Image (spheres, grey):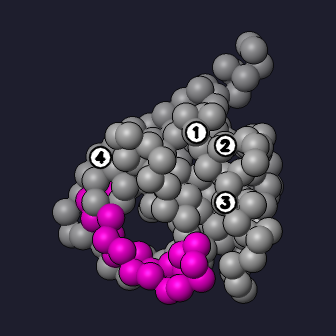
């Protein structure tokens, strides 16, 4: 498989909610493989299919230290979120060159269809939880900067555009 290019903000496809995946097919497996290659090439700890222009509810997350532990998810949904929060600097290849601190629940329980086609529930904590929530936002047509105030969001987007014009 291979790394795919990421859409760049303000591509309208980044704002569209992704479509549910009906079943795990060889095509879905191939998309997941490309997503993992793309995530590793960034490098990053997660990727959602809409980020590479695929309008399906697919995500991959690998926040392990050793890498190679990617969790493949179809149709992920948060069942429970911790009342404890965690601040983390988040970024996206869709808005290159910038990052912002986002506050999210420290832990989440997520239900998803795994690569075997089975429904799975899994608890994620710390960076894993942050990344899963970040990817689910993408599947819902949201980006991390939507969690910022309007002023901070405007400044972040302007800074990214300025950096992109320079390169």
Q: Are marks 2 and 4 in contact (CB under 8 Å)?
A: no
Q: Main secondary structure of the magenta part?
A: strand
Q: Tell which tag, 2 or 4, sits nearer the viewer.
A: 2
From the top left corner, tell me how far across and down residue 25 is, in percent.
75, 77
| Left or right of residue 166: residue 138 | left
C-alpha gap between disc 4 and disc 3: 28 Å
From the top left corner, tell me how far across and down residue 154 is, in percent.
59, 38
Instruction: Give the residue at x 21% y 69%.
Output: 83
Q: Are marks 2 and 1 in contact (CB under 8 Å)?
A: yes
Instruction: Give the residue at x 52% y 50%.
Output: 46
Can you say whether 14 is above or below 93 in the image?
A: below
Q: Tell which tag, 4 or 3, sits nearer the viewer.
A: 3
Q: Which residue is mark 2?
A: 38
Q: Can the viewer see residue 140 in this picture?
A: no
C-alpha gap between disc 3 and disc 2: 10 Å
Q: Is residue 115 located in the magenta-colored stretch of the structure?
A: yes
Q: Are marks 3 and 2 in contact (CB under 8 Å)?
A: no
Instruction: Give the residue at x 40% y 48%.
Output: 63
Q: Nearer the viewer, residue 56 or 89?
A: 56
Q: Which residue is mark 3?
A: 32
Q: Which residue is mark 4?
A: 87
C-alpha gap between disc 4 and disc 1: 23 Å
Instruction: Give the residue at x 73% y 23%.
Output: 164
Q: Which residue is mark 1?
A: 40
- SS of the residue under disc 4: strand
Can you say whether 138 is above or below 156 in the image?
A: below
User: How many tags in the picture?
Assistant: 4
Mark earlier in primary sequence (4, 3): 3
């Amino acid at each position: 498989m291979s790394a795919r290019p990421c859409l760049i903000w303000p591509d309208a496809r980044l704002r569209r909610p992704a479509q549910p995946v009906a079943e795990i097919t060889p095509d879905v497996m191939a998309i997941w493989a490309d997503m993992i290659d793309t995530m590793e090439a960034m490098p990053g700890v997660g990727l959602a299919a809409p980020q590479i222009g695929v309008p399906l509810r697919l995500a991959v997350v690998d926040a392990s230290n050793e890498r190679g532990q990617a969790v493949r998810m179809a149709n992920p949904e948060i069942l429970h979120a911790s009342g404890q929060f965690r601040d983390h600097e988040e970024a996206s290849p869709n808005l290159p060159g910038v990052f912002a601190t986002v506050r999210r629940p420290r832990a989440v329980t997520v239900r998803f269809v795994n690569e075997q086609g089975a429904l799975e529930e899994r608890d994620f904590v710390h960076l894993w939880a942050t990344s899963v929530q970040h990817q689910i936002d993408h599947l819902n047509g949201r980006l991390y900067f939507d969690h910022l105030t309007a002023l901070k969001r405007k400044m972040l987007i302007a800074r990214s555009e300025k950096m992109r014009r320079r390169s």
